[in-house]
Image: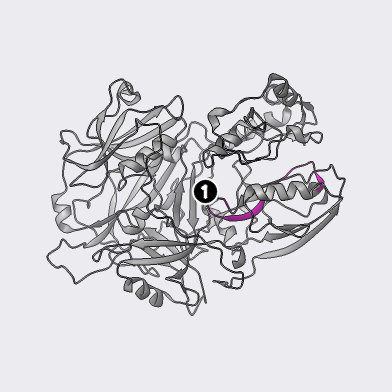
Amino acid sequence: LCCECGQAHPLLDNHLYNFQDEVDDELICHICLQPLLQPMDTPCGHTYCFKCLENFMQEYSFCPMDRKKLSFQQCHKSSLLVRNLLDKLIVLCPFKAECQQTMQRCELEAHLQNRCPGFKKYKSELQRKRNPISKGKEDPPAKGETNTPRDPEGPSGGSSLVAESSGAAVVSLGTAEPGLVNPAFEETEEGENLPQRTSLVAETTTIEIHREDPEEELGMRIVGGKDTPLGNIVVQEVLRDSVIAADGRIAPGDHILEVNGVNISSVTHCQAVSFLRHPGPVLHLMVLQEKGFSSKAAQQDSSSTQREVIHVTLVKRDRSEPLGIKLIRKTDEAGIFILDLLEGGLAAKNGKLSRNDRVLSINGQDLRQGTPEAAAQIIQTTESRVNFVILRQPGVQLGEPVEDASTSNSSSSSSSSNGGSPVHHRRRPDQNHYRRKSNYQKKTVAIKKEPKESLGITIGGGRDNKNRLPIYVTSVQPIGCLFRDGRIKRGDVLLSINGIDLTHLNYYEAVSALKSNAASHSVTLKALEILSLNSPEPSLDIREQGFSWSPLWITWLGLPSYLHFCQDIVLSKGNLESWGFSIVGGFEESKGNQPFFIKTIVPGTPAFRDRKLKCGDEIVAVNGVPAIGMSNSELIPMLKEQRNKVTLTVVSWPGSLV
């Protein structure tokens, strides 16, 4: 829990408060719908929370209310009078079971630290919970049973990019694991004189993660679990500026096999989330990391030069401050290298980066196959801390660069190197791509209220969201008519209010619709309550109070198809390349129809370079042909028949945050 407000929220998000009385609408932020925190005024006369506006301006360049052109630099702090009015709002102590005190908002932190018996009790319980969990291993898994076949690549340990663990085990993925058909690896009879890709190399590594705050989120999203076709727990995304991003060794697509000595390769999704959310200053993770295709020739030629992985953090005073780094590509090797450090620049003053260093990642974004333009864009859009993970090979001279190079010295955005964007479209409700078991129930809530009484809920999602999510309830506040009624719960998907359809709206349109209809004497809400999917456990996302709340990945799988947002991803490849992903799922006699999921994405392949496809994505169609009812043995040949271009229609749900 936050030591300033006593409630659970992400480290970088606004504090949460329980207000005693209804707050005047003039003091409400129209982005988060909560009383303003660190209020900022825009030139067009609107006021928002500092963090809300900062996050909004990272994606958009207009005012959320009137859509006039706006930049964050044009905004300024609200007057002292407004800030004092906000600080004097009366709030309730969040530990209402042990403390019934009320106070001004500005006094809550001091109350929690010095006088609140509830917060004191919470801190003492937290200290007890911080004892390390038992490391007794129950029935160690047979390696390869749920991971990969174990064909050793030879005593050299394969062509690993970074030897992160002296005891790293290298395995070959040339043969698919049971139940996994792998279009990523495809033997070819063409071009016998070309170097052949003999196997897909992966490596198991033990990684030790340190946290200054034992309660801090790791900052990654996961998918999978034994109760899903994916089986293993797979990292879908690493969040920028998180603990995992700063460490730099875990990347999307990694399979998590053990947490603090406990095997999680055959646990449910909810159990895996619980293990990864367990607080503690040190976390030991065993992960399986794919390193891409290798040939015997490449293994024999691999350099024996000792290589060193170095973590460097540079802190910018503001987003526009340049680092003074010249980045280039080499003609004979993939990746990005530092050509020069500009004299007097931030990187040169720091002194930890050197010429010829290879950039592996920046702020957790994997750049092993990246471009200088992609690296520059990450640097330029970062507000403050820029975390580098670099590989240093002593004595290696830099080869001739390719013509295109990029420098982070410019404060303007570099030209886009992403190519064409995928075509997004909504499928009609009658085009259900997968008839799922009923994991939800519809409910209609009709309530009478005072016109000035608020609904008292906060929402998330929206069709402008990165994952095009439906609108869902993130909290039901202790003030407002819905808390009093009790039927709308956190996690419910909102379908309509007073007959107005919410399912196609973006976040700001939904906020506007909810606010305008809340002013009437009666409100009718239609919602979906998503039930626990394939798990007898109580909903874990409700139990985990110490972490920011968002629905679990497995929860989204229970939604009806008409609420899914499909997008087309177009991949292109050369004649001798493979697509670079593996899939699981499909029709089986014993299990019936199951969705197809992306399980792995192989470094250095078309799917990896495109960066739009993610582990855990559901394949709905291939070149417009629906995948529903197909088996693995039917879908794989269809993928392999596509020589140079394929269009995948996918649904992408955000992984569970740990």
Residue at image x 54%, y 33%?
71
Residue at image x 52%, y 75%?
593
Residue at image x 68%, y 25%?
109
The number of numbered discs placed on residues in the rendered structure image is 1
- Amino acid type at circle 1 is Phe
Instruction: Classify mark 1: residues with Cα within 10 Å, few (<14), some (14-19) or many (20+).
Output: some
Compared with 528, 28 (above or below) is: above
Nearer to the camera, 174 or 41:
41
Please identify the residue farthest to the left as the structure is shown: 193
Question: Does residue 126 appear to the left or right of 92 in the view shown?
Answer: left
Quadrant assignment for the N terminus: top right
Q: Is residue 137 visible?
A: no
The structure's colour scheme is one colour
Say which quarter of the image contains residue 647: bottom left
Compared with 42, 436 (above or below) is: below
Secondary structure category for the residue under label 1: helix
Instruction: Give the x, y percent position of residue 257.
Output: 41, 53
Residue range (magenta): 464-481
Question: Does residue 581 appear to the left or right of 267 in the view shown?
Answer: left
Q: Is residue 319 visible?
A: yes
Instruction: Give the x, y percent position of residue 77.
Output: 62, 24
Question: Does residue 449 appear to the left or right of 218 in the view shown?
Answer: right
Instruction: Give the x, y percent position of residue 291.
Output: 29, 53
Nearer to the camera, 162 or 515:
515
Q: Tell whether position 470 is magenta.
A: yes
Compared with 18, 540 (above or below) is: below
Residue named by callout 1: 275
Residue at image x 50%, y 47%?
276
Nearer to the camera, 591 or 340:
340
Question: Does residue 569 appear to the left or right of 641 in the view shown?
Answer: right
Say which quarter of the image contains residue 582: bottom left
